[in-house]
Amino acid sequence: MNPTELEAQLEELHRESYGWALACCGWDESEADDVLQNAYIKVISGQAEFGGRSSFRTWLFGVIRRSAQESRRRTRSREKTLTRVARLQENPAVTNSGEDWVERSQETDRLVAALERISPRQREVVHLVFYHDLSIAEAAGIMEVSLGSARTHYERAKNRLRSLLRSAPGKGAEEGSPHA
């Protein structure tokens, strides 16, 4: 579908698309605006490609639905983080504990050492997903790789990090062991 046809289709379905975005977002207008904008960006940028296996409308509604799911996932992640931060602020003794600080510092060192031992592509996708709270699809767009490739790098990175972190409890990655 050429850009002019794509634009015409999106324009024709905009009212219905917005209604669907509202339904997917629990009738939160602000969230629906964001979700619909993200869906349009995916469609226009080519991150989501119409394959012709269904009607354009059905496919577009699927893109909107997935965008809403990604939005909810990011919102839940932020809420969990804010809840943890609030708990720590309610109990300052925990945050000021020297022993606690040392333990967190050691865990951070182990994670950094493990991250250094995975491939650059794997490290890149993990960084985008975890530290920038992006979806794998968004990370794929940024990395300029296919969604399938980004998913593969992400899964391999998680498995490799899990293995590395289990293999060296309480210490960094094995000494003198370059990338495995």
Image (cartoon, rainbow, N blue to C red):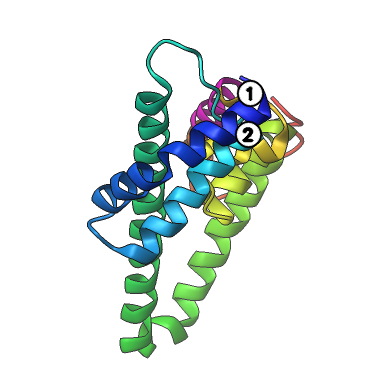
Instruction: State whether residue 62 appears in this view.
Output: yes
Q: Main secondary structure of the magenta part?
A: helix
Look at the image and say whether residue 61 sits in the magenta stretch: no
Q: Is residue 72 left or right of residue 180?
A: left
| Range covered by the magenta-colored residues | 148-161
Q: Position of residue 2 (x, y in %)?
A: 66, 22
Camera-nearest residue between 5 and 82: 5
Given the current orientation, which residue lies at the most extreme top position? 53
Eyeballing the image, is 94 above or below 122?
below
Whether the residues at callouts 1 and 2 have beta carbons within 8 Å, the answer is yes
Task: Write down the quadrant of residue 174 in the picture.
Answer: top right
Query: Badge 2 local density, few (<14 within 10 Å), some, or many (20+)?
Result: many
The kind of residue on which mark 2 rests is: Ala
The kind of residue on which mark 1 rests is: Ser
Camera-nearest residue between 148 and 173: 148
Q: Position of residue 52 (x, y in %)?
A: 47, 12
Task: Using the image, tell me which numbered label, if any, was put on residue 146.
Answer: 1
Q: Quadrant of the C terminus?
A: top right
Task: Write down the quadrant of residue 95 in the picture.
Answer: bottom left
Per the image, the residue denoted by label 2 is 140
Q: Is residue 157 left or right of residue 18?
A: right
